[in-house]
Amino acid sequence: MRHLIDILELSVDEIDALIETANDIIANPEKYAEKCRHKKLATLFFEPSTRTRLSFEAAMYELGGNVLGFSEAASSSSAKGESVSDTIKVVSSYADIIAMRHPKEGAPMVASMKSDVPVINAGDGGHNHPTQTLTDLLTIKREIGRLDNIVIGYCGDLKFGRTVHSLANALSRYKNVKMVFISPEELRIPDYIIEEVLKPLGIEYVETADLMEYMPELDVLYMTRVQRERFFNEADYIRLKDSYILDAEKLSHAKETACVLHPLPRVNEIAIEVDEDPRAKYFIQAKYGKYIRMALILKLLGIE
């Protein structure tokens, strides 16, 4: 039995194979319509979600399977004090595979140790979000045409942004990837990403507070929101929330072939006017999330 808690649990070959399967699903959806018939996915979301939860559910339905679960902690027995371990023990007797989001780092790992079925981490606090990373990789591969030989800029909340942490980890294993980390000092990328991932692998990286300094060089600009829910101090959130706003004028300095991504939800860090630019790929990115999750469900259930 296999779980997916951290993107690094997948080899580069496995990621490439998942992308290949997702591309085949996009091209030939009818081939996959009954692959998960009589299988059940449990979506255990202890934290709010729109895209991740619904894309998991849509993925399972399009594979011919069924879905059960809850969309907030208040509607589960955790509101009565039940532990994650007990919840998982029970739910894994009802479902064939589980997708779990939790505000506490490490909760999906605990769940995987108690589960009788595969567990997918659908986001744990500020730590990891491996299926968003698979979505990002599929998007980059389809829109740029490659995952190596790129310059990617991450902009916004890099301290609490689990999507940034996971994507940096994944792309560090591809050749000739340069990373530009754009943030205020208070929201800079965690030291462990620099010291434990980038430096040991010899990855070229830059830290800067200036969005425009590297804009003309970027193949991918990965925007993130400043996340109110990760702040203990409301004053700090208000001070930092508008640190970077991408508008049409700023984007005019980017390559014509550049790709703007965002894990969503967007607040105001990307102006609405940018949506009409052909380089804005964040809505198609959300759509690709369904296909890569379909591929992952098949892999973890051992379905060819």
Image (spheres, grey):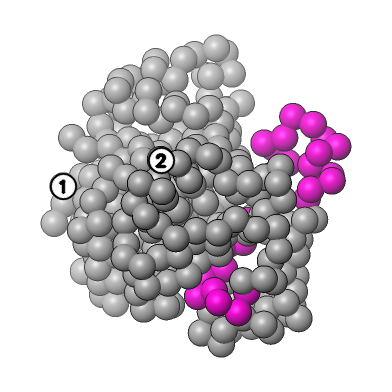
Query: Relative to 77, is 141 on the left or the right?
Result: left
Residue 21 got which mark?
Answer: none
| Residue 270 point in image, percent of width and height | 71, 66
Q: Is residue 148 above or below residue 170?
A: below
Q: Mark 1 belongs to which amino acid?
A: Gly
Magenta stretch in the rendered image: 215-241
The residue under the point 29% across, 71% down is 23
| Residue 195 point in image, percent of width and height | 45, 41
Q: CA distance from mark 2 to mark 1?
A: 32 Å
Query: Relative to 64, is 156 on the left or the right?
Result: right
Other-residue count near label 2 (Cα within 10 Å), few / some / many at <14 / 14–19 / ≥20 = few
**Residue 253, quarter of the rendered image:** bottom right
* Residue farthest toward the top in the current orientation of the protein: 81
Foreground of the two, 249 or 176: 176
Foreground of the two, 3 or 38: 3
The residue under the point 45% across, 65% down is 178
Report if residue 25 is visible in the image: no
Q: Which residue is mark 2?
A: 196
Q: Secondary structure at mark 1?
A: loop
Q: Secondary structure at mark 2?
A: helix
**Residue 142, quarter of the rendered image:** bottom left
Q: Is residue 261 above or below residue 209?
A: below
Q: Is residue 181 above or below residue 257?
A: above
